[in-house]
Each structure stands twice: as C-alpha cells, then as structure tokens.
C-alpha cells in the first residue's frame, strides 16, 4: 500500500503546493453495511395456512423491494429525478454526480470539476482524477488506510488538524429469505447484493474534519478506480453549517457514479 499510495498521491502532473485553498474545495458520507438474517426452521414438517400466507407475503415483498433497491442504487436514475439538484455528466471521463442548485462552477488548478456556493465558500464539491495502474480501490488497502493517506497528503493542508470519523466500503446487501417445507428443500435463500453502482465497482467513502486556525470543515469523500483513473469526489461545509447541509452533501456523494469509457 505504501509505495502504491505514494505514487498515487504525488503525481508529477499535480503540485499540491499550487493549491493553497485545495482543502476548502474538498470533502464524504459513509454508507453503512447492514443486513438482516432470518433464521430457518428446518424441523417443521407441517405447513399451516398462516405459514403459507407468510411465505406469500415474503415473496410479494421481495418482488416489490428488489426492483426498488436496484433503481434507487443506480446513480443515473437517482440523479435524473432528485429535486433541488443539477446533474453533471462527464462523458469523456465517465462520471456523473449531483450538486445543489445555486452552486456555481469555478476553475481550480488540479481539479477536474469544482462547484461551490458563492456565499459560503466552504460549501463545495470537487472531482479529482489521477492516473493509476491499479484495477480496484481495494488494491490500495482497506478503507481506513486509504482515507487516512488521502486526508493527510491530498485533501487537507499540512497545517490543518484532521480527524477521520468513519471510512467504509460502499455496498448495500439485501438478504431476502423465504422458506419451503418439503422433503427435498427446507429453505431457499435469495441474496441480492448491490454495490454503489451495478457494474460491481468498489467504492470507499469516508467522513472527516479538517480544522484550520479560522474555520473547521466537515467533509465527505468517495473514491473509486475505473478506466485507468483514481476518482475522488469530495464535498463539505463549514462545521457550523454541517447540520443544515449534511443531507444535501450526502446526496452529492450518493449520486456519484462511474461508467466504463
């Protein structure tokens, strides 16, 4: 991880010293992995009317929920239907995301895209692209290790005090179990696993705080590897406005999707 990450965060084409305000353009939200397991009752040989009704309800629920999960986890679907946000679609580099209505695009050296609020400059979203020979974000190590390296070397100024709040791999696991009584099968387990995008790409997300002498920024980032690039989207806000802005910033991170180009 050490040498690989070092080559990533110190590319010859980008000088972090040329970005004195880079930390104000950068920032994440973790997607916790939760699953429920319904224990089986393989010793039951009789099927009551209540059991049959329960199985029908479970099957109906699965048929209803599974498509909902599929579409809600697809960034493009969410991006095109979210009110109060505008869609960015970069066909050349293969990514899309949402940003709050009213933010304006600005040019920041070393960043592929930056949108920010003109009144609250710490409220912004940026996308950074770096070339990499890796094929998967997990090749750089676990989420916490990758997050700490990026925060210390890329996403915050060396003079800022930083704190990693949470880092995780993005995945949504929905486990749907239904039971069949019979002499051949006692249980069928259907597990539907969806990741942040349906292509199966792995994403890491992390939440952190960067404290400067005159402000504290609360930030969210999401990173992924695809198309020979290391993608980093970061958004955030002043700590004093975090409670007001956090849902919108989570929407930005949740909307980030990479496609193959």
Image: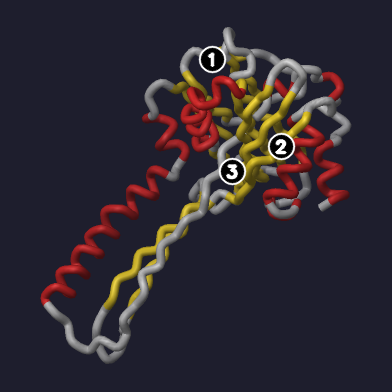
Residue 128, position in %: x, y?
Answer: 70, 30
Residue 183, position in %: x, y?
Answer: 27, 91
Q: Disc 3 designates what residue?
A: 260
Q: Residues within 10 Å of mark 1 (few under 14, many from 20)?
A: many
Q: Label 2's element?
A: strand
Q: How many marks?
A: 3
> Which mark identifies residue 103?
1
Mark 2 and 1 residues: CB-CB less than 8 Å, in contact?
Answer: no
Q: Label 3's element?
A: loop
Going from the N terminus, do you reach mark 2 or mark 3 first?
2
Q: CA distance from mark 3 to mark 1?
A: 27 Å
Q: Is residue 235 left or right of residue 59?
A: right
Q: Residues within 10 Å of mark 2 (few under 14, many from 20)?
A: some
Taking depth in this image into account, of 110 and 124 the one nearest to the observer is 124
Taking depth in this image into account, of 241 and 79 the one nearest to the observer is 241
Q: Disc 2 designates what residue?
A: 163
Q: Nearer the viewer, mark 2 or mark 3?
A: 2
Q: CA distance from mark 2 to mark 3?
A: 33 Å
Q: Nearer the viewer, mark 2 or mark 1?
A: 2
Taking depth in this image into account, of 174 and 30 the one nearest to the observer is 30
Residue 135, position in %: x, y?
Answer: 70, 52
Q: Quadrant of the C terminus?
A: top right
Q: State the image quarter where residue 49 is shown.
A: bottom left
Q: Is residue 70 visible?
A: yes
Q: Is residue 226 above or below residue 106?
A: below
Check the image and tell me how it is coloured: secondary structure
Q: Residue furthest top?
A: 119
Going from the N terminus, do you reach mark 3 or mark 1 first?
1
Q: CA distance from mark 2 to mark 1?
A: 27 Å
Mark 2 and 3 residues: CB-CB less than 8 Å, in contact?
Answer: no
Q: Is residue 124 visible?
A: no
């Amino acid at each position: 991880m050490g040498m690989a990450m070092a080559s990533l965060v110190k590319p010859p084409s980008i000088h972090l010293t040329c970005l004195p305000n880079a930390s104000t353009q950068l920032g994440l939200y973790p997607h916790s992995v939760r699953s429920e397991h319904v224990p089986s009752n393989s010793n039951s040989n009789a099927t009551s009317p209540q059991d049959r009704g329960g199985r029908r309800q479970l099957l109906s629920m699965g048929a209803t929920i599974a498509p909902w999960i599929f579409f809600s986890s697809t960034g493009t679907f969410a991006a095109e239907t979210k009110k109060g946000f505008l869609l960015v679609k970069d066909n050349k580099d293969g990514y899309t995301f949402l940003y709050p209505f009213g933010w304006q695009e600005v040019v920041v050296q070393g960043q592929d895209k930056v949108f920010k609020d003109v009144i609250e400059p710490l409220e912004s979203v940026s996308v950074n692209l770096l070339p990499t020979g890796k094929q998967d974000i997990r090749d750089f190590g676990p989420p916490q290790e990758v997050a700490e390296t990026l925060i210390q070397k890329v996403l915050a100024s060396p003079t800022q005090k930083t704190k990693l709040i949470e880092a995780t791999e993005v995945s949504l696991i929905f486990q749907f179990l239904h039971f069949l009584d019979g002499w051949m099968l006692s249980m069928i387990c259907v597990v539907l696993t969806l990741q942040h995008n349906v292509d199966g790409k792995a994403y890491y997300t992390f939440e952190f705080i960067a404290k400067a002498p005159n402000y504290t920024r609360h930030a969210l980032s999401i990173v992924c590897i695809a198309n020979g690039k290391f993608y980093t989207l970061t958004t955030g806000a002043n700590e004093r406005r975090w409670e007001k802005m956090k849902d919108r910033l989570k929407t930005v991170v949740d909307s980030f999707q990479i496609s193959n180009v």
